[in-house]
Amino acid sequence: MNSKERIKKAVSIEQPDILPVDFGGSTTTGIHVCNVYNLRQYWGLDSKNTPVKVTEPYQMLGEIEDDLREVLGIDVAGLFWRSTFFGFRNENWREWEFHGVPVLVPDGFNTNKNEDGSIFQYAEGDKNYPPCAKLPKGGYFIDALKRQKPFREEDLDPKDNLEEYQLYSKEDLKELKEDAEKIFNNTEYAILGQIGSSGFGDIAFVPGMQLKKPKGIRDETEWYISTLTRRDYLKSVFSKQCEISIENYNRINNTIGEMLDIMYITGTDFGMQNGLITSIEAYRDLYKPFHLKVNKWIHENTGWKTFIHSCGSVVDLIPEFIEAGFDILNPVQISAKGMNPLKLKSKYGKYITFWGGGVDTQKVLSFGTPDDVREDVKRNIEIFFKNGGFVFSSVHNVMGNVPLENLIAMFEVIHSYRNI
């Protein structure tokens, strides 16, 4: 099997030939740029001080190029928009040093430090407007800044929370086709598209960091309050967003549909460490109707599998995700309450693919010993890999402070299941 065939087999819940693996296929299965650099150095892919591109600056994720993808045994290539979370584009790269590592950042990325050592980022890189985010001194990734304007309830307009959701233009689709063809025509990787606009209530997008003057409900706390107190308002936002999303998926399908294997639908988090953020009732009322519409359209009109990312203890919502039509669940946070790998696999393994859950990133990968990592990875593979329905990835992104020896230990076990 090649990589595309292997992933297709896995997400059809059939046993592939060897362990399927993803790192870098999405913004929730990535590797921090510092560790991309370390891995490239370890495997001798670069000379010392060769910089790595920061392709997702919000979380400071590094580019996984084909040579590293091959060495690590990765089966997936991600397809993304050229624009970043901050509205500036991934282009006109320039050198910068980050935690002692040489990196390349886009031209719109601000590298000027404030007096306290932090660094602001600006929507579209435009410093004529207040900053939208901040990299704290010594931090490994960037935090959104609160830019909520005072408002009166009677003045709230759902259109204000829809400014960032627009129909894709011919130029957008032209660029997307160029990028998709580079992967499709030159590799045999499965292609995961994170190019939709259907992340209803995804808190990473709520602040509108790409907007110079965001309007509407943009404060994270106020947004979560709104899921209880302003549900009709959010339904109006989601309804129009859903309409735009489906038309955008239609345009994507008409442009590159046959090249794609998986579509990343939503990254909205419904769980926390010890339980749900969103009740089952709230999910059914506020989110599920729109998930059903999107998944129904995709399954009736394309060959794509659909991907939901939701952190935390979401075990009580997994039956709802399945009913809503999702094929894939990520990140499978096995460290959260009730997210026991054996129970998840035995109860839901016939109905949904677990994409992630390969190693606990909260404690084991970041703070355990290499032997701890090997034991955790082997145990999780032995449980999840049986009978298909599993793509190995860590629980969310590999952070910048993970010891290199722990990463090597993880890949040693992965390679043993891939005959590398």
Image: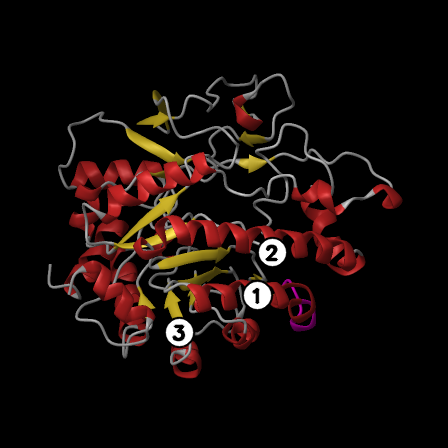
Mark 1 or mark 2, earlier in chain: 2
Asked if the residues shown at circle 1 and circle 3 are in contact, with their CB atoms under 8 angstroms apart, the answer is no
Which kind of residue does numbered mark 1 sit on?
Lys
Q: Looking at the image, is mark 3 or mark 2 nearer the viewer?
A: 2
Measuring from the top left, give residue 184's x and y in whole percent.
24, 49
The residue type indicated by label 2 comes to Cys
User: Magenta stretch: residue 278 in it?
Assistant: yes
C-alpha gap between disc 1 and disc 3: 30 Å
Q: Quadrant of the rendered structure where residue 99 is?
A: top left
Q: Which mark is residue 106?
A: none
Residue at 76% over, 60% down:
228
Q: Nearer the viewer, residue 20 or 215?
A: 215
Q: Is residue 329 left or right of residue 410?
A: right
Q: Is there a contact, CB below 8 Å, between mark 1 and mark 2? A: yes
Q: Secondary structure at mark 1?
A: helix
Q: Position of residue 30 (x, y in %)?
A: 36, 47
How far apart in space, not on screen, are marks 3 and 2 (Cα)? 33 Å
Residue 242 tag number: 2
Q: Nearer the viewer, residue 115 or 411?
A: 411
Q: Are marks 3 and 2 in contact (CB under 8 Å)?
A: no
Distance between the Cα atoms at labels 1 and 2?
8 Å
Q: Residue at x 20, y 38 (%)?
A: 40
Q: Which residues are magenta?
A: 277-282
Helix or strand or loop: what does disc 3 sit on? Answer: helix
Q: Is residue 80 magenta?
A: no
Q: Which mark is on residue 341?
A: 3
Mark 3 / mark 2, whichever is N-terminal: 2
Q: Which residue is mark 1?
A: 293
User: Where's residue 143, x and y in %?
Assistant: 56, 37
- Amino acid beneath label 3: Pro
Where is residue 104 drawn, in percent x and y?
33, 26
Q: Nearer the viewer, residue 322 or 400?
A: 322
